[in-house]
Image: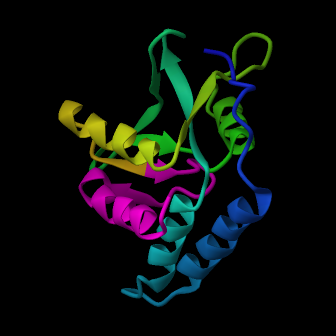
Amino acid sequence: MRENRMIKDNNPEVVAELDRLDGAIRAAPAGDTTAQIALWRQVTALEHWFFLARGSAEQPRPYAVAAEQGSMICLYSSATRAKEAGQALGLADAEGGVPLFGVPVPAAIDYVASFGQVGVFGVTLDHPRLGHYIPLANLGLLKGWVEGAGR
């Protein structure tokens, strides 16, 4: 599947806030999860979650990486970041294009959670740029935040 031009990219200000929160996480004392929680709340504020497409164009599946804990689906906060990651990870085609797709939030939460049935452990954000992750078992928390926001 080639990039879907029908889906507009996320608000750059919402995405930039993720970088600020990444810095706060890295500066936080050990055990302080305040910035980590704020980061994942911000992820739920995105309109779409983007994924690098693997498999067929008709039935793409998200790119995942192997981690110590288990497989992690790579979630991207913007189409731009997904394309950059795809190129950095060597997933671009001969013309330099990176196949990707977007799923609107909150449906994206259920979409990612469904991969728990095939043994996926978690989801990692903007890999390899940020790399923060959350276990699929904790996605219900994110869904609660979205529902609480009245989406």
Q: Nearer the viewer, residue 48 or 84?
A: 48
Towards the viewer: 135 or 43: 43
The residue under the point 27% across, 46% down is 121
The residue that appears at 47% across and 30% down in the rendered structure is 63
Bounds of the magenta span?
Answer: 124-151
- On the rendered structure, is 15 left or right of 135? right
Task: Provide residue 17's location: percent of width, then percent of height.
Answer: 69, 70
On-image quarter of the N terminus? top right
In which image quadrant can residue 130 be found?
Answer: bottom right
Is 125 part of what is drawn in magenta?
yes
Task: Tell which residue pokes out farthest to the front in this image.
Answer: 150
Residue 86, image x, y percentages: 65, 31
Question: Visible in this render: residue 105?
Answer: yes
Above or below: residue 143 compared with residue 9: below
On screen, residue 106 versus residue 99, left or right, reads left
Please indicate whether residue 132 sits to the left or right of residue 20 in the image: left
* Residue 72 x/y as whole percent: 38, 43
Task: Answer whether residue 66 is visible to the viewer in this image.
Answer: no
The residue lying at 44 percent from left, 14 percent from top is: 59
Magenta-span inclusion, residue 128? yes
Q: Tell me where residue 115 appears, x and y as whole percent.
A: 29, 35
- Asked if residue 125 lies left or right of residue 141, the reply is right
In this view, the residue in front, 126 or 41, is 41
In-front residue for pair 110/64: 110
The answer to whether 73 is drawn above or below residue 47 in the figure is: above
As displayed, is residue 54 above or below residue 23? above
Q: Quadrant of residue 22?
A: bottom right
